[in-house]
Image (cartoon, helix red, strand yellow):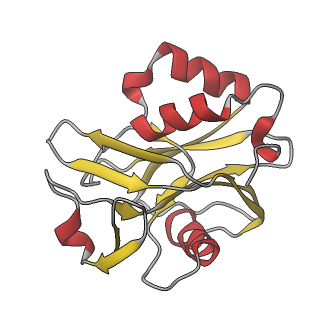
Amino acid sequence: MVLLDAEHRPSGTAPRTEVHTARTPLHLAFSCYLLDDSGRVLLTRRATSKQTFAGVWTNSFCGHPRPGEPMEDAVHRYAVRELGTTVRDLHCVLPSFRYRAVDASGIVENELCPVFVATCDGPLAPNPDEVDALRWVSEDELRGAVAAAPWALSPWMVEQVAELGLAGSTWGRVAS
């Protein structure tokens, strides 16, 4: 994984197994929201075998670029790895999103995590090691879930939805 300094510049690398701990260093990641052709958003329920935030509903998929890997390439790679699909019309909507969250086991997520939106370009075949369930929702349903049950959702998605606003199909209009 790509480690970052306080100014968000690459400062080294570390194996993934050594990074997510109670003292997780700042590192590079991404989040991606997939849309279908009618504008619905794909939410996924994280597999219960996941190390952090197991079983919570979240954005379509997340991941970490390899050292030297362009972020867009990492997004495409994880779309195949986690959801068995390809994506098109990929664009970054929150380039500087950063969060820190602690799950119930005490493991810390500490990431500079640009947020992408893309259109799903094929059938879904979720990897059961990553995803327990899928659900396509409207923007109104997503906002309603965040308002009604933020505790059942990933903390990064709750923060991202707040930053995006999502008023009137904001997905494609946030500056990249």
Nearest to the observer: residue 155 or residue 85: 155
Instruction: Say whether residue 149 is left or right of residue 169.
Output: left
Q: The N terminus is located in which quarter?
A: bottom left
Nearest to the observer: residue 12 or residue 101: 12
Residue shown at the point (68%, 52%) measured from the top left: 34
Q: Where is residue 39 in the image (x, y as percent from the top left)?
A: 81, 41
Most extreme residue toward the bottom is 68
Q: Position of residue 35 (x, y in %)?
A: 74, 48
Q: The C terminus is located in which quarter?
A: bottom right
Q: From this view, report whether residue 119 is shown above or below residue 134.
A: below
Q: From this view, report whether residue 144 is shown above or below residue 25.
A: above
Instruction: Say whether residue 53 is left or right of residue 143.
Output: left
Q: Where is residue 145 in the image (x, y as percent from the top left)?
A: 55, 21
Residue shown at the point (34%, 59%) measured from the top left: 6
Determine which quarter of the picture holds residue 162: top right
Q: Position of residue 174 (x, y in %)?
A: 76, 44
Regarding residue 129, the answer to whether it shows in the image is: no
Residue shown at the point (24%, 40%) measured from the top left: 102
Instruction: Say whether residue 63 is left or right of residue 115.
Output: left
Most extreme residue toward the front is 7
Determine which quarter of the picture holds residue 75: bottom right
Q: From this view, report whether residue 1 is shown above or below residue 172.
A: below
Most extreme residue toward the top is 148
Residue shown at the point (49%, 86%) measured from the top left: 68
Regarding residue 168, the answer to whether it shows in the image is: yes
